[in-house]
């Protein structure tokens, strides 16, 4: 960023601090800066500074420090500013924070490439899952993007993020008395979120016009600081826009196809223009799915405008672009009708130096040429580096898209595999972190900085079974307490029927073996597979000596009626007295509830239709915290399962009886393996064989399926390589040319 832009942002933050947080005593005024940097969200000692101001307020504001600082009575702040013990902790945390923000030159990235100027990557994604105070995510894709930014910050990988701000979020879910999902409008709290306006040279909120779109489309620019990584978010609620354009950024994944196209134009073309307007230099683009693939068109157009031939411009754009595809599900790939593309790109495509046929060919699906303009096909054609998000998914993607490269056999299609990971500091519970540090840290003092090293995790075996089990039980009790608190709040607001109280978990048994299933509710994920044989399920959950219970959560897409029907069936069965209150469906699944679930259940259940799960990350999160996976062999679990760290079953081939066969395999494992192992207790109450499996799961999964390993793979496989195509040939020891346009 240019010094001028940096000064403007610092001025903006200082203005916010003076006006909205003038009541915060000067001695602890650093809390304001800290609250506007999400670094606090993956550093428990930083979060504790806000919680210790007033525990009840911390709960009431849903653990949002900006909101907490705004709402907390001044007396509590003044008391903290005079408390010697609080100030000691405050000074330590603030020192760590400032050192972190200033030490990019001693980061992993700079150590790997000491002779190179920073290679900045522009990372585009339609959603980012960072914290529930920023509800700009729908699920796994968004949290993968958020974890990617956090890990790049920790490793010192130079990056800038670009996404959308959705005033209406994705979907707030209210389950009505009959179990039907109702979509609830929840207006975004602009003033209570860790987000700041980006200012232009005149000091006004920056607004940028999307190039060559007629009628004109404008985007407004906001900023979220994710550790060392700036994330710029766009919205279209701008007076300059026509009324129908202003709602373009209202919701994530609009059902209206034309509104969806405008979103992707604003994100891709507008996002590229915003970075240029800000004066941000970068060498390459990484697209997280095809939603932002229009950014590649804009990069090509700019080069043609500066005098390059279309062929040379396309070559350079391809060579400096990374494209990650995430789904083998056809509905996950955006395809727009050609007449709609013509409406919006009639003034744009000639500036690429292409005729209509050559332009539309960039987005033509090789197997379905008349289907429309395919954003995934565009992403593949205008990038050189491509990857799926697990080894199996890469195989499936090569088969799906092999005709993009018709001259190559399927196995040589250039789609590599970089398996997803999760950001360990975000998803590892603090008590587990302290336990690991106690036993690993004695042998590996810097284990958290090297947590992708499998050798480190062998020390997990040194943890006494009783200590690991006690913390697991504490996390389980914490989950149930959270469920009761959520139900209390809903009862106070809606006064539900007693059956709804049962369905939403108030009668769950804290001592019973607890399975968790939490993800998007749709047909192929088969949330209701366990309900295939209700009599067999009833015997499982009502077993007097070894009871089992199931906790479900997830949202159906607003336009997915079949998903809503599956959700309703599960909810109504949870109300059925025959299941004794041991089935629950938790409303409005999001980032905060996810933390409790992935840390507090005993077993994580996953049973999609085979080859439909590209990767999955929730099972990685549970493993960090000692929870075991029971999953069909698909996605990441094909790589993660070793026969000793959980359970797996093969999906049956497609047939009318496939669900019945898969459900039977699932019941067999639960009845004959999972339940007996869980209830095989020693006289001291500890299930030692179960705990041994927990340890094996932690050791085998934590280092391999972390974003630390994942981001390092992106850096070593792709990010340096794009320099070879950024202009003149270079090698890895030379300064990489950056993309910087004049003006």
Image (cartoon, rainbow, N blue to C red):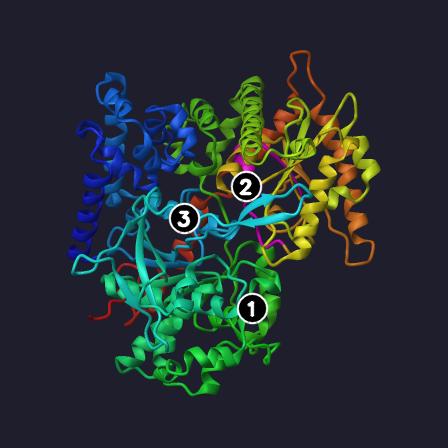
Q: Do we see residue 367 in this rendering?
A: yes
For residue 421, above or below residue 456: below
Q: Is residue 317 magenta?
A: no
- Find the distance from the CA under tag 1 to the CA under tag 2: 29 Å
Q: Indicate which label's residue lies in the foreground, 1 or 2.
A: 2
Residue 237 is situated, as x and y percent measured from the top left of the image, at 36, 61
Q: Which mark is residue 412?
A: 1
Q: Nearer the viewer, residue 564 or 137?
A: 564
Q: Are marks 1 and 3 in contact (CB under 8 Å)?
A: no
Q: Please tell me how crowded label 3 is: few (under 14), some (14-19), or many (20+) other residues with Cα within 10 Å.
A: some
Q: Are marks 1 and 2 in contact (CB under 8 Å)?
A: no
Q: Which mark is residue 571?
A: none
Sequence-first tag of 2 and 3: 3
Q: Indicate which label's residue lies in the foreground, 2 or 3.
A: 3
Residue assigned mark 3:
188
Residue assigned mark 2:
620
Sequence-first tag of 1 and 3: 3
Quadrant where the N terminus is found in the figure:
bottom left
Q: Which structural element holds mark 2?
A: helix
Which image quadrant for residue 82? top left
Q: Which structural element holds mark 1?
A: helix
Q: Please tell me how crowded label 2 is: few (under 14), some (14-19), or many (20+) other residues with Cα within 10 Å.
A: many
Q: Nearer the viewer, residue 724 or 44?
A: 44
Residue range of the region highlighted in magenta in the rendering:
613-632
Residue 281 is situated, as x and y percent measured from the top left of the image, at 25, 62
Task: Please give the name of the residue rendered at 82% of the width and 36% of the height, measured from the top-left corner.
Answer: 536
Task: Please give the name of the residue rendered at 39% of the width and 70% of the height, measured from the top-left corner.
Answer: 296
């Amino acid at each position: 960023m240019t010094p001028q832009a940096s000064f403007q942002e610092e001025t903006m933050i200082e203005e916010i601090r003076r006006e909205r947080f003038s009541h915060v005593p000067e001695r602890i005024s650093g809390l304001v800066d800290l609250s506007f940097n999400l670094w606090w969200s993956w550093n428990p000692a930083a979060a504790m500074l806000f919680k210790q101001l007033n525990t009840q307020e911390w709960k009431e504001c849903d653990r949002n420090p900006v909101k907490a600082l705004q709402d907390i009575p001044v007396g509590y702040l003044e008391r903290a500013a005079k408390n010697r013990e609080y100030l000691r902790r405050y000074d330590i945390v603030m020192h760590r924070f400032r050192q972190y923000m200033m030490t990019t030159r001693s980061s992993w990235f700079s150590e790997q490439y000491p002779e190179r100027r920073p290679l900045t990557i522009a990372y585009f994604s339609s959603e980012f899952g960072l914290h529930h105070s920023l509800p700009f995510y729908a699920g796994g894709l968004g949290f993968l993007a958020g974890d990617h930014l956090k890990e790049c910050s920790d490793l010192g990988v130079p990056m800038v993020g670009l996404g959308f701000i959705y005033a209406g979020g994705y979907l707030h879910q209210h389950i009505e008395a009959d179990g039907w999902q109702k979509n609830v409008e929840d207006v975004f709290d602009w003033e209570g979120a860790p987000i700041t306006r980006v200012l232009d040279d005149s000091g006004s909120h920056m607004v940028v016009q999307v190039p060559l779109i007629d009628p004109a489309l404008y985007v407004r620019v906001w900023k979220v600081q994710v550790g060392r990584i700036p994330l710029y978010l766009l919205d279209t609620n701008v007076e300059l826009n026509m009324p129908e354009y202003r709602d373009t950024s209202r919701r994530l994944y609009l059902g209206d196809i034309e509104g969806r196209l405008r979103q992707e134009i604003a994100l891709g073309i507008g996002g590229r223009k915003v970075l240029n307007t800000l004066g941000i230099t970068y060498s390459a683009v990484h697209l997280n799915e095809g939603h932002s693939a229009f950014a590649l068109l804009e990069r090509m157009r700019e080069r043609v405008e500066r005098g390059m031939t279309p062929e040379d411009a396309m070559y350079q754009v391809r060579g400096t672009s990374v494209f990650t595809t995430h789904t083998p599900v056809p509905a996950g790939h955006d395809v727009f009708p050609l007449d709609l593309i013509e409406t919006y790109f009639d003034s744009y495509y000639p500036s690429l130096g292409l005729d209509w046929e050559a332009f539309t060919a960039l987005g033509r699906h090789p197997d379905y040429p008349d289907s429309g303009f395919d954003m995934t096909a565009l992403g593949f054609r205008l990038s050189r580096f491509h990857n799926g998000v697990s080894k199996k998914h890469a195989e499936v993607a090569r088969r799906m898209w092999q005709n993009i490269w018709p001259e190559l056999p399927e196995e040589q299609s250039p789609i590599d595999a970089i398996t997803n990971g999760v950001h360990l500091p975000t998803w590892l519970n603090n008590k587990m972190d302290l336990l690991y540090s106690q036993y690993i840290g004695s042998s590996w003092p810097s284990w958290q900085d090297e947590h992708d090293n499998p050798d480190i995790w062998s020390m997990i075996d040194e943890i006494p079974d009783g200590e690991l089990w006690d913390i697991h039980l504490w996390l389980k009790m914490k989950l149930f307490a959270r469920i009761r608190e959520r139900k209390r709040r809903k009862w106070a607001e809606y006064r539900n029927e007693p059956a709804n109280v049962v369905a939403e978990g108030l009668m769950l048994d804290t001592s019973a073996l607890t399975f968790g299933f939490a993800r998007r509710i749709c047909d192929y994920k088969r949330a209701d597979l366990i309900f295939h044989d209700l009599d067999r399920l009833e015997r499982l959950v009502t077993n007097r000596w070894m009871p089992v219970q199931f906790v479900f959560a997830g949202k159906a897409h607003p336009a997915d009626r079949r998903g809503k029907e599956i959700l309703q069936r599960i909810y109504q069965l949870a109300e059925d007295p025959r299941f004794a209150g041991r089935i629950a469906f938790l409303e409005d699944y999001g980032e905060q509830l996810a933390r409790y679930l992935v840390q507090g259940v005993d077993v994580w259940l996953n049973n999609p239709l085979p080859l439909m799960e590209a990767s999955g990350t929730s099972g990685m999160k549970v493993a960090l915290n000692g929870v075991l996976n029971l999953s069909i062999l698909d996605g990441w679990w094909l790589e993660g399962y070793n026969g000793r760290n959980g359970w797996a079953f093969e999906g049956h081939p497609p047939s009318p009886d496939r669900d019945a066969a898969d459900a039977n395999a699932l019941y067999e494992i639960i009845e004959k393996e999972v339940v007996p192992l869980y209830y095989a207790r020693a006289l001291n109450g500890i299930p030692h064989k179960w705990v041994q499996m927990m340890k094996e799961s932690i050791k085998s999964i934590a280092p391999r399926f972390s974003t630390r390993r994942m981001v390092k793979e992106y850096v070593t496989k792709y990010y340096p390589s794009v320099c070879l195509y950024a202009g003149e040939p270079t090698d890895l020891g030379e300064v990489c040319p950056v993309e910087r346009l004049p003006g």
